[in-house]
Amino acid sequence: MPSPTFAGDKKVGRSLLHVLEQKAIAWTVPRMPTWIEGYHLTILTIPISLLIILFSFLAQGSFAWLWGVSVMIVAQYVTDSLDGSLGKHRHRGLIKWGYYMDHFLDYIFLCSILIGYSLILPDHLKYLQFFVLVIFGAFMVNTFLAFAVTNEFSITHLGIGPTEIRLIFIIINTLLILFGQTHLARFLPFILGLSFLGLCVIVYRTQKYIWDMDMQQKNKSLQ
């Protein structure tokens, strides 16, 4: 039996901002300069991540530098949204390389944000970052394990995808700039609690979907 076609470049599921996002991508991609390739945009996550750490380091002196972090988050969103679509549009996409590098660098991007927060948050809040990394890492592990089993690649759950997660980080930065660290202490446990609850729901749904797949295959083999 032939193996299924690789589907890592075909995402399933829709986030809250999916329709608006797709319209923006469809308008932008044909207007991209010809000298820019999709893999150029993918690799840009590396300098963007380094700049996030730099701006976070500078934010130890003034939280105004977090505007720079937020700008880099937007920049990473733009490059991450356009790289695959640009390759498809020009029929020059590197599908498997793009899948691997894109999502590995997404992890690097997430780590750069958490490293940045570790530089500016007070010591009594830094332990919360461990739980942030654990929960976000669990989302990624769930996504890739489910893809390996189902060949359906979904990075959107309960209407929340990478775009919405980036917006949450920008909101956190804005709160830090406007109100300092005091109010953040109230929000972080709440955000972590909601994230953990969402993770439990997603894992339950995923395992049930895979269970049903196995049972259907088992029933077919018994017929």
Image: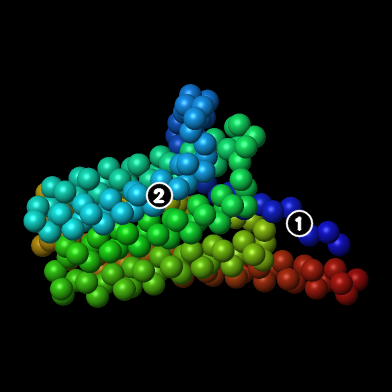
Name the residue that disc number 2 marks. 45
Q: How many labels were placed on the picture?
A: 2
Q: Residue at x 66, y 52 (%)?
A: 7
CB-based contact (under 8 Å), mark 1 and mark 2:
no
**Residue 92's spot in the image, x, y percent?**
62, 37
> What secondary structure is found at the residue carrying circle 2?
helix
Image: 107 above or below 131: above
Residue 155: tell me if it is visible: no
Image spot of residue 53 (x, y percent):
26, 57
Residue 48 pos. (x, y %): 34, 48
Query: Left of 84 or right of it: where is 130?
Result: left
Question: Which mark sits nearer the N-terminus, 1 or 2?
Answer: 1
* Residue 116 horizontal/vertical position (percent): 25, 60
Residue on which the image places disc 1: 4
Observer-nearest of 198 and 3: 3
Q: Amino acid at mark 2?
A: Thr
Q: Residue at x 19, y 71 (%)?
A: 125
Q: In the displayed structure, does residue 106 sit left or right of residue 1?
A: left
Q: CA distance from mark 1 to mark 2?
A: 30 Å
Residue 120, placed above or below residue 28: below
Q: Residue furthest right?
A: 223
Residue 117 in view here: yes
The C terminus lies in quadrant: bottom right
Figure quadrant of the N terminus: bottom right
Q: Quadrant of residue 186?
A: bottom left
Q: Left of 158 or right of it: where is 165? A: left
Residue 142, disc: none
The amino acid marked with disc number 1 is Pro
Q: Residue furthest front?
A: 35
